[in-house]
């Protein structure tokens, strides 16, 4: 061949070889960050440049994001470029390359090219990165030398740009596929976490971590709608930002706006700064600059919002909306199931509590099936009970300890129209003052230290039934107005609660105290007394109906004989006479316990009663009051038992009292240990 034959130069050959190497990049990379350095290395075989940039179009934001390569280093943080008055914007829009042999004489794109000139660049070109399917962005090269990027170089660079565009499209497709797989995996993880047997608030940190792998955030939380207060209450949080937050208003709060609009809301820093709310101020104080609130709802209606906050500007993109809505839907279903489960559990617990309470009440009765006695004073009291039972009137049963006031109250309940409903009792003297309010009215979870669950009070348990308040004269003065309100308005609030609860109860109260004297002492409200004193019934002391003692003795001896598998056929006249002449300060309860001890001591057919115990009872001076006599008797028995209260040989058994009742009486009578220990 002659010398004029058209052969490619050595530099062109190297350029075409570089193009083949660029094509090889299509199958080698999965991320743009890995592709760009290799692409720069191969482009050096095609053209001379010191700086390079790649602008990628973000279709969601409709912006160009620039990554620069300079001095052998890649800038990992992309910067945003406008379309107007930039070479990248012009090339992306017109899909034609731009080449500037000498930037010093180029008047166009002044704002953009002034930055390039400031880097010492004299020759510059911008090439479109485009495939048949989409426009991806632009590729720019620059050098301090003049008069570069002529026709031959530009032709090779355009071919390289086309190859690079294919590489980018392939990498982006792989990235999108991987992202979709990650999103699906996230949804599966969240679903698996939610269907576990744990409460939503316990698994929420794991849910937040799963979301964080796809949608970056620094704080996550759930707010659940409370229809009673018309607010959003904090349910589960992964940050202490709102640890002290009780609720959010529906209006004038970011989460409330999303909840009311029933659509996802994204708030940037400027919007957050304009909101006058404590929660938003806390977020801003911790550096949060973006907030995303996603409404949660099911077929039954809205439940609340899922909220994510980030320290980055514009952290939440349109591409995240679909995923976040799906996650919010999953959490909403889990919350609804949790609420249903909680309600079912609450009803089951209440039923179990009522059942257990009634079982306990049955087992703690005085163990006689009916009131025993034929004396006129007892029959008069029973007649009054029969008269008042069908009415709904409040009854006040008066009498000494152990006279059977609770038994009479149960009889009134059985004869009333409420006989098929609960009979609930509460001994006001047997429960410490600090717990009495909780026992009577109930409490909400967290109402006080130790209140780890909600408690149903006796008032609620007695709804539609009868509430028996024993020892009502010992109710603390500060609780008396609350009880008066129940009697007047039939409503109250649980301790620590705000919801008013209405009840329909019949009240039967009992006391061994002189309420009129208590009023004079300023320890009992007169208005409460008149509410209780609607229909008083006085039960006589056992010493006032001595003719009933033989009936009671035979009843208890037969009962305990059967229980202990003994055959006791006879009670001597001496024993019966001694029993009838005893004053029985503890009344029927004391007699019952004395006869139980007697049956235990008996080993034949004749009852052997420890009558010496009765002879030890000191004579009562006529000048002593009933309260003084009762106090002295308790002190004497405590001395005899060495201060032991509970147990078979304790003072409570000997007095015919419950341990808690005796402890309450010791406190009420101000009996000190020194009085019986010495």
Image: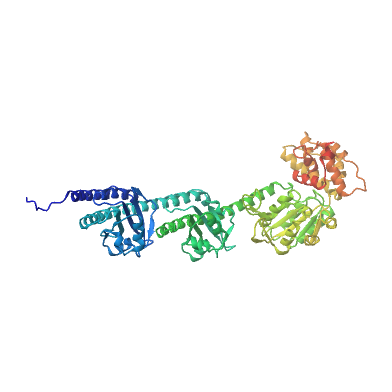
Q: Nearer the viewer, residue 551 or 617?
A: 617
Position of residue 354 measured from the top left corner of the image (x, y, whole percent)? 64, 52
- The outermost residue toward the top is 603
Position of residue 113 measured from the top left corner of the image (x, y, whole percent)? 34, 60
Q: Nearer the viewer, residue 580 or 535?
A: 535
Q: Nearer the viewer, residue 651 or 46?
A: 46
Horizontal side of residue 355 vs 370, given as left or right: left
Horizontal side of residue 54 vs 400, given as left or right: left
Answer whether residue 58 is visible to the viewer in this image. no
Horizontal side of residue 121 vs 204, given as left or right: left
Position of residue 193 measured from the top left corner of the image (x, y, whole percent)? 46, 49
Q: How is the image coloured?
A: rainbow
Horizontal side of residue 423 vs 198, given as left or right: right
Position of residue 68 measured from the top left corner of the image (x, y, whole percent)? 35, 53
Q: Nearer the viewer, residue 421 or 148?
A: 148
Query: Which quadrant of the figure has residue 641?
Result: top right
- The outermost residue toward the left is 1
The residue depicted at 72 percent of the width and 62 percent of the height is 485
Rendered position, 25 above or below 150: above
The quadrant of the image that shows the C terminus is: top right
Rendered position, 179 above or below 647: below
What number of labels is visible?
0
Answer whether residue 17 is visible to the viewer in this image. yes
């Amino acid at each position: 061949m002659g010398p004029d034959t058209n052969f490619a130069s050595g530099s062109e050959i190297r350029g075409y070889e570089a193009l083949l190497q660029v094509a090889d990049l299509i199958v080698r990379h999965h991320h743009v960050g890995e592709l760009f350095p290799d692409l720069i290395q191969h482009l050096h075989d095609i053209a001379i440049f010191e700086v390079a940039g790649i602008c990628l179009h973000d279709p969601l934001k409709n912006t160009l994001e620039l990554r620069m390569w300079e001095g052998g280093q890649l800038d990992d943080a992309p910067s945003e470029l406008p379309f107007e008055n930039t070479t990248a914007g012009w090339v992306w829009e017109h899909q034609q390359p731009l080449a500037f042999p000498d930037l010093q004489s180029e008047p166009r794109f002044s704002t953009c090219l002034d930055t390039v000139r400031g880097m010492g660049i004299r020759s510059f070109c911008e090439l479109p990165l485009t495939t048949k399917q989409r426009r991806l962005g632009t590729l720019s090269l620059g050098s301090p030398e003049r008069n570069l990027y002529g026709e031959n170089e530009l032709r090779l660079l355009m071919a390289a740009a086309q190859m690079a565009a294919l590489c980018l499209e392939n990498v982006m497709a792989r990235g999108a596929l991987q992202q979709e797989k990650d999103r699906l995996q996230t949804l599966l993880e969240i679903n698996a976490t939610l269907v576990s047997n744990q409460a939503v608030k316990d698994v929420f940190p794991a849910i937040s971590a799963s979301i964080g792998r796809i949608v970056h955030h620094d704080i996550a939380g759930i707010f659940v709608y409370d229809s009673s207060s018309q607010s959003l209450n904090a349910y589960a949080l992964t940050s202490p930002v709102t640890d002290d937050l009780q609720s959010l208003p529906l209006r004038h709060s970011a989460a409330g706006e999303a909840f009311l609009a029933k659509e996802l809301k994204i708030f940037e820093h400027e919007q957050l700064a304009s909101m006058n709310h404590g929660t938003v101020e806390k977020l801003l104080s911790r550096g949060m600059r973006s907030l995303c609130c996603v409404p949660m709802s099911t077929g039954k209606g809205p439940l609340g919002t899922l909220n994510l906050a980030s320290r980055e500007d514009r952290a939440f993109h349109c591409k995240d909306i679909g995923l976040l809505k799906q996650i919010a839907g999953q959490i909403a279903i889990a919350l609804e199931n949790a609420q249903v489960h909680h309600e079912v559990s609450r009803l089951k617990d209440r039923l179990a509590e009522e059942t257990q309470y009634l079982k306990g009440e049955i087992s703690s009765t005085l163990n006689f099936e009916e009131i025993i006695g034929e004396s006129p004073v007892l029959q008069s009291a029973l007649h009054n009970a029969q008269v008042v039972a069908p009415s709904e009137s409040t009854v006040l049963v008066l009498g000494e300890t152990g006279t059977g006031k609770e038994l009479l109250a149960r009889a009134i309940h059985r004869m009333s129209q409420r006989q098929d409903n609960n009979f609930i009792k509460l001994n006001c003297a047997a429960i410490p003052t600090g717990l009495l309010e909780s026992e009577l009215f109930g409490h909400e979870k967290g109402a006080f230290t130790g209140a780890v669950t909600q408690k149903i009070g006796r008032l609620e348990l007695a709804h539609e039934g009868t509430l028996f308040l024993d020892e009502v004269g010992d109710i603390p003065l500060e609780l008396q107005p609350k009880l008066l309100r129940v009697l007047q308005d039939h409503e109250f609030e649980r301790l620590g609660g705000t919801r008013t609860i209405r009840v329909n109860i019949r009240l039967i109260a009992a006391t061994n105290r002189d309420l009129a004297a208590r009023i004079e002492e300023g320890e009992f409200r007169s208005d409460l007394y008149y509410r209780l004193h609607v229909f008083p019934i006085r039960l006589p002391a056992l010493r006032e109906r001595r003719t009933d003692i033989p009936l009671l003795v035979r009843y208890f001896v037969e009962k305990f004989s059967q229980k202990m598998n003994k055959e006791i056929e006879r009670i001597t006249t001496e024993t019966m006479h001694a029993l009838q002449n005893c004053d029985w300060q503890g009344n029927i309860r004391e007699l019952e316990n004395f006869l139980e001890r007697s049956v235990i001591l008996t080993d034949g057919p004749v009852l052997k009663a420890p009558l010496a115990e009765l002879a030890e009872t000191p004579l009562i001076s006529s000048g002593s009051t009933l309260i003084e006599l009762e106090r002295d008797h308790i002190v004497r028995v405590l001395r005899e038992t060495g201060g032991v209260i509970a147990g078979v040989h304790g003072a409570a058994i000997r007095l015919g009292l419950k341990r808690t009742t005796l402890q309450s009486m010791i406190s009420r009578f101000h009996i000190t240990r020194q009085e019986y220990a010495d």
